[in-house]
Image (spheres, rainbow, N blue to C red):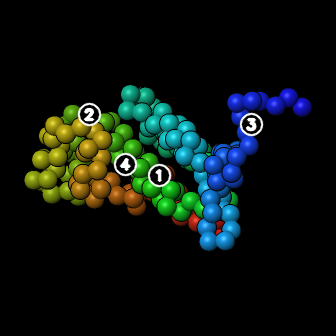
Amino acid sequence: LKVNKDKSAVGHVTKRKFLGFTFFQSRKEIDIRIHPKSIKRFKDKIRKITSRSWGISMEERIKKLNQTTVGWINYFSIAKAKSVISEIDGWIRARLRMCIWKQWKKPKTKTKNLLSLKASKEKAYEWGNTRKGYWRTAHSPILLRTLSNDRLKRAGYPNFYDYYLQVTV
């Protein structure tokens, strides 16, 4: 057996990483959580899939996103990570809103699409002509209301926090 000196070490159980997991002390027992490096690598994958400059259809993007996220959640489902999964799920939804906003391109198209999603005329015109960046607009009240979680779910992006809760039960 060859031992990798970089990966192998002796240390306290709460200070080591093992297969993407780390351990922590809760009350009188040791529990499993997702290591921060694993979360960072996952977010990097999601950033690549939801890159604004990658010109793929939204259906293809959501398909790749679902494959990546379901696999990651299935692997890490043994960890105690409700708050982490909830936070990542919200972050991914914001990334999707940002991609949709970028695909609309022109202010006229943005205004027209906001109107078709039942936004008021004033707000649709205001946000359709905004000079704010894509990421900032993805968190705006108008996109949170018009491109709601329910609407994203109907477009094919499920709520992964709910999926995580089903898998862990």
Label 2 sits on what residue type?
Answer: Lys
Identify the secondary structure beneath mark 3. loop
Q: Residue furthest right?
A: 1
Where disc 1 sits, the SS reads: helix
Image quadrant of residue 135?
A: top left
Horizontally, is 104 left or right of 13 in the view? Answer: left
The disc, 2 or 1, on the residue closer to the chain's N-terminal end is: 1
The circle drawn on residue 94 is: 4
Tell me the tag on residue 8. 3
Q: Residue at x 37, y 48 (%)?
A: 94
Mark toward the viewer: 4 or 2: 4
Q: Amino acid at mark 4?
A: Ala
Residues at marks 4 and 1, CA–CA distance in whole angstroms? 10 Å
Position of the N terminus, as image quadrant, is top right
Up/down of 6 relative to 163, above or below? above
Name the disc covering residue 128, or none. Answer: none
How far apart in space, not on screen, are marks 1 and 3 (Cα)? 30 Å
Q: Which residue is mark 2?
A: 105
